[in-house]
Amino acid sequence: MKGLSVDGFAAFDRSWSFSKAFATPYVLYTYKKSTNVYEPRIVGGNNNAASINQSQQTLSQSTYNIKLNYQTGWASHHLNAFAGYEQSQIKRENFAASRINFLSTLTPELSQGGSAATDRDNSGSSYSFTRKSYFGKIAYDFDEKYLAEVQMRIDGSSTFPKGNQYGFFPSASLGWRISKEPFMNFLTFINDLKLRASYGALGNDNVGLFQYFTNYSLKNQFVVNSGSGPVIVPGLDLTKLKNLNIHWEDARKLDIGIEATFLDNFNLEFIYFRQKRSNILATRNASIPFISGIVNPFQADPLVPSENIGKVDNNGFEATLGYSKRKGKLRYTITGNFTYAKSNIVFIDEAPGVLSHQRQTGHPLNTYLLYNAIGIYRTQEEIDKTPHLSAAQPGDLIYQDYNGDGKITADDQVRSRYGNIPLISYGTVLSVEYENFDLSAVFAGQTKVSQYVLPESGTVGNFYSSWADNRWTPSNTNGTYPRVDTRTSSSINGGLYNNTFWLNDASFLRLKSIELGYNVAGRALSAVRLQAARIYVNAFNLFTITKVKDYDPEGNSGSGQFYPQQRIINVGVNVRF
């Protein structure tokens, strides 16, 4: 049958990973000014003892895909359709073991650790995840002027219980190439103009597994009388209640766009988008009182299961404008892009009495709840004159009494305006060619974005030099950073009272890449019997303009413990024989 074809594939992937870490204690000295002596103490390792941790993971994945295609056309009509099926399975196995109390740090092997039961530990887990998908598309166009397309997906996932495993996700799109209409002939400066719109649904099953089972953990131990005497036996802890009603998360997205080429050298694309995400799996922990008995203590994983209750809207636009010109042997192109994307939490379970300036509802995703830091106490007199924490001392941050009740409490925390997802991102791509030379560059940036970074410093890590060099001390009372503490995570200037001092404007403009090349041509090639040769020099992340001093503004770790993007410079030659 003309126009009918079948294609498919089978893919098998298998990977292994292994890690081994040996931690040894070390001596830390604390200076005592009264005695002029450095007093040593041992820190690090596991409870000040050498420890080893080993783990390995095995991951396998198989995917099968088959697709039936049909393509035909008559006169100015064109039809393209396909129907397909795909299934996949992922299996993962994990194993880990640890040991402490080594007689010597010269033998970093599992077998050389302490022999007591409390010196050894191990763990293991495995899971299998499967998915089945039925999908298809019918696309039609008339003279490449009027375009229509309908798609559908039926996806099944083992993440959800029977009865809720499958989700149906249809979509449709329309296009109209206005520039092919006769009434556009008088607009000679427009080379091509197209309007398009699409609306469709997508599903998400990338959520925690086994939520439709009641979860138990082997945690506690109990002493029972077995007849021959008391023995210790493991006990089961209830860690999560089941929810048999969980199902796919949904996203409904609308796109309206315009594409144009005009004045021969300009191209433009503008897209407005709106997405409504619903049925997001989230816990209802905040609105359930503790007296219910099914809510775990503060900051613990709640016993209550996740439910499809969350709602988040996203809307914004994307714009791209480019200019390309050729003049003799010179050709150059510049393209700029700009994206504005704003998220809004429509519903997330919050306690009924949460204060308006602390609510997540109505704010963007990933915002922070922080105390407003408005300065540093220089003297005890400053502390006595203002509302302060009972443990405040010179060198500590000054927290704003936001509600004006004369004291610093949890009610003074305020929701930040931005999170670590940029509201605006932008970029520029440049390219120039002249004879055998070419130059290209890519700039990228973001703004209206904040990143909270509190370095884990003190006995468990290093201070940023900007903090260490400019900290408040009795001899440097004008320091721009608060006094240091043994651990920032347990300091009133840090983890105990998360605050805006550590919230940074993560805006930046970065030269992502730049390359200069020369294509060797003419007699030089034939002399060495080469078909082609190119000499180039390129660089990545050559410079960044940002207010952030101590870490990569594209990072997203709250402790600053992420590897920064490297500055790389290459010089090379490509040859073809």
Image: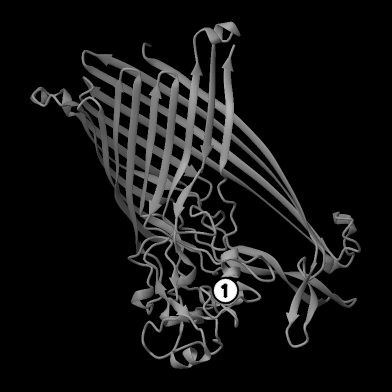
**Percent position of residue 49, x then y:** 82, 68
**Percent position of residue 250, x then y:** 38, 50
How many badges with numbers are in the image?
1
Question: In this picture, is 277 found above or below 362?
Answer: above
Question: How does the figure colour the protein chain or chains?
Answer: one colour
Q: Which residue is mark 1?
A: 471
Question: In this picture, is 59 found above or below 177?
Answer: below
Residue at (39, 65) in percent of width and height: 348
In this image, 240 relative to 19: left or right? left
SS of the residue under disc 1: loop
Question: In this picture, is 148 found above or below 121?
Answer: above
In this image, 15 relative to 68: left or right? right
For badge 1, the amino acid type reads: Arg
Q: Which image quadrant is residue 415 in?
A: bottom left
- Image quadrant containing the C terminus: top right
Residue at (38, 11) in percent of width and height: 1
In the image, 230 versus 240, the foreground residue is 240
Residue at (54, 23) in percent of width and height: 535
